[in-house]
Every structure is written in C-alpha cells, then in structure tokens.
Amino acid sequence: SSGGRRLQSLRPAAGMFICRRRPEAKRLEAFASARLATLREELQHVVDEVANEAGPRGLESLHPQCAKDFDRAEFEIGGRSFSVAAAASSGDKELALAEFACCLLEECGSATLAYVISALASQLSMAKLSALCYSGPHGYAVPSGYTVPRYIVQHRGDSVAVEIIRVSEGFQHFSLAGGDPYECHQSSFIKQHARVLLHEELVESSGGPGRLQLAVEDVWEAMRILWPDERVVEKDGLELNFRSPIRDSEQTGMCYVDLRSLPRAAVVAFLGRLSGGGASVQAGLAAVVHMVVEAVRQYVSAEKQKVA
C-alpha cells in the first residue's frame, strides 16, 4: 500500500557526530533561493491587486480575509498585542475588531496602506509562504489545534514591515500528505517565517504616491521531527531536523572551536609539534583532539550549571 511505502521511506536518522558533513545542505540552499524570489513575486501580485481594489482614496475597513482571521491568529500591531480568542472572550468582538482596525490605521498612516497591509497580514500571505516551504502542510500535516499563525506589523521609517509566522509545536502525531499518522515526540516542531517591507514609490514627474513596492527581507523554514524515542526522522535520505536556508556556521557541516579559549601553552606546544613532522604531527593532532574534547566538556558542564 502507499502507506507502507511511505513508512519504509521514514526511518531514524544515523547517529550524530560533533563534526560531520551534511550532504543535504546544497539541496536546502537551492530550495531557499527559489522560495525567496517566488514569494516576492507572488506577494507583489497580491499587493497590486488589493491596492487597485482599495482605490486612490482607500477603504476605511480591513481586507475581508484579515477580518475573518482576526481572533483566530495572533496579531501584534506597533507593539500592541491581539491574542487568539481574546475578542470573543471580551464579549464584544465587533468593538475589538474596530479597535484593531484603528490601531492598524494609526501604524500604517493611510487608509490605502492599512487596507493593503491587512491583506498581507492574513491567510492570503500565509498560504503562499506555506506552499513555498518544504515543511508546508502540502507535505506534512499535524493535528488541528497545534498550529498558530502570527502577524507582526510595525512602522519603520517610510515603510511598514510585516512578519508572517506559522508555528506548529506540541503535537505528538504527524502524517505525510494523504497518509496515515505516525507518532512523534512532543518536542517536534515546524516553523515558517517571512518578513516583508512595503513602501510607496514616488512618481518622479509629480512627486506624488506611486506603486506600492514589496521587498522580502527574510524568509526561512525550520523543522524537527523526532520519533517517540527522540531519534531524528529521516525521509528519503533527508534528516527532518534542519533550518532552510542553512545558517553560515552550518554551510560545511563543521563545528568550530575558538582557539582563543584554549590554553596558550597547549596551542604553542601543538604548533611546535607540527613543525617537527612525522610522529610529531600525529602527537600534535592527538593533542588538539584532546583540547577540543576538553573544551566541549567544559562548555557542557557550564551549560548544565546555568540550567541548575
């Protein structure tokens, strides 16, 4: 059955080592590059459509999708938070929605911009972001109630920044698209994040407002899916424990040790052995391995003390 084939494609990942190469790094980096360009193109299309819908004078209301998402998602507008179900709990959802719209208008500075921003801070953008992520719901599904969408809107100079965040965590089951659920550890998570910037271009001939331009400042995804015994799930050779794009320190899959943290006498002795060649080189390499292990041991010990 298809479920059986999918089960065979999922297995615990191989043991983790302090220093190793990650063969999937290039694949994830290529995926991230395509995602950024495509997301910008698709969200700019949304902006153009919604701006035309609003017209030059703007609409003194929220975009319908944002109004629908209100109280189902977390919003932060200029530092003011609107939590999930808070409006319903207050007993007057219409009043809460009106306050939300006023807060957004104040942060954006104009009715047209507020209307367009409200469209970006909605499922319209979230759906596009998720579709462009390897970890999106088209590939990995989690039970309902464990995914919280979040939008952050903040005025920045002559622009408005919008963060689009989707976090799934705390779940104990997941499934591949159309497949049966598998058990997983509760510390598993799936995260998708984008930060876009919207500003109004000025028309050179008149100095008046022109097209709203969108830039994608940052976009990434991260996932960690663990079996109940906390081993990493591997699907078709890819460990489901990554961030894409990969951070600079992970590009080679190597770990780094700050030599300045090692005893100066030990470093001098190591360099002296290297200059001797032959057995001296082997002794030098053994010495540096010992220093690295000791540095890691001290770091782990210090972290445990912090927790305690």
Image (cartoon, rainbow, N blue to C red):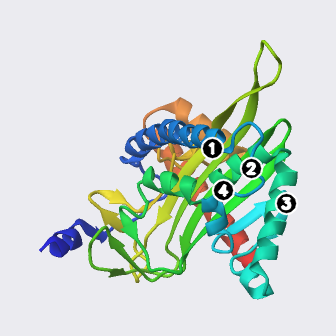
Q: Residue furthest top?
A: 205
Q: What is the distance, in whole Å, between disc 4 and disc 3 at their CAs?
A: 14 Å
Q: Residue under circle 4?
A: 63
Dot 4 falls on a residue whose secondary structure is loop
- Where residue 132 appears, as percent x and y from the top left, is 44, 49
Q: Is residue 149 above or below residue 95?
A: above
Q: Is residue 85 above or below residue 196?
A: below
Q: Nearer the viewer, mark 4 or mark 1?
A: 1
Write down the quadrant of residue 260 in the picture.
top right
Instruction: Pick whichever of labels 2 and 1 is earlier in the sequence.
Output: 1
Label 2–label 1 contact, CB within 8 A: yes
Q: Residue under circle 3?
A: 103
- The amino acid beneath tag 3 is Cys
Q: Which mark is residue 53?
A: 1
Q: Residue under circle 2?
A: 59
Q: Nearer the viewer, mark 1 or mark 3?
A: 1
Dot 1 falls on a residue whose secondary structure is helix
Between residue 243 and residue 75, name the one nearer to us.
75
Dot 3 falls on a residue whose secondary structure is helix
Q: What is the distance, in whole Å, between disc 2 and disc 1 at their CAs?
A: 9 Å
- Where residue 167 appears, as percent x and y from the top left, is 57, 67
- Where residue 61 appears, as percent x and y from the top left, is 74, 57
Q: Nearer the viewer, mark 2 or mark 4?
A: 2
- Where residue 198 appears, as percent x and y from the top left, is 71, 39
Between residue 15 and residue 51, name the one nearer to us.
51
- The amino acid beneath tag 2 is Leu
Instruction: Pick whichever of labels 3 and 2 is earlier in the sequence.
Output: 2
Label 4–label 1 contact, CB within 8 A: no
Label 1–label 3 contact, CB within 8 A: no
Q: What is the distance, in whole Å, between disc 3 and disc 2 at their CAs?
A: 15 Å
